[in-house]
Amino acid sequence: MNITIQNDNTTQAAIEFIHWLSTRSAWARGVKTYALELIESLEGDYSYAALLNGATDWHAYSYGGSALIYNSDIAERLCSPSELKRCKGGYNQPSPRETWLDVQTRALSQAARLVHNAFTA
């Protein structure tokens, strides 16, 4: 899906759409932050390919260093204070089945959906 951004008004409207979204959890606030960063990285057109910035998918985007790279930074962005304490600020992995980069991958995927909704709303 490719939607050409006609001018800054469309981008500004998408940013305002995301700013107005209700965020009650640390996860939702983190996803919202990723979405705003993705919009800021766009140059000229909106598409999933433009959002991915050359990566094949969100896993490659996350593991390739296009987003946060330190476990502690990812944990601080996506965890509540109690979760952050439980995982010792990102020192411990979030679960036995997942790394912090995997968690970031999920958050980026949700952020991309927010950006898509913002540009098509």
Image (cartoon, rainbow, N blue to C red):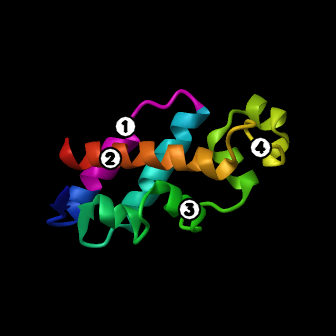
State how far apart marks 3 and 2 are (Cα): 22 Å
Residue 38 drawn at (x, y percent): 42, 59
The part of the chain drawn in magenta is 12-25
Indicate the secondary structure of the residue bearing disc 1: loop
State how far apart marks 1 and 3 are (Cα): 23 Å
Give residue 16's mark: 2
Q: Give the side of residue 66 with respect to residue 19, left or right.
A: right
According to the picture, the residue beneath numbered tag 4 turns out to be 93
- Mark 2 closeness class: few <14, some 14–19, many ≥20 residues within 10 Å: few
Above-or-below relation of 7 to 19: below
- Looking at the rendering, in which quadrant would you find the N terminus? bottom left
Residue type beneath disc 1: Trp
Give residue 67's mark: 3
Q: Residue at x 41, y 64 (%)?
A: 56
Q: Give the side of residue 55 with respect to residue 97, left or right.
A: left
Residue type beneath disc 4: Gln
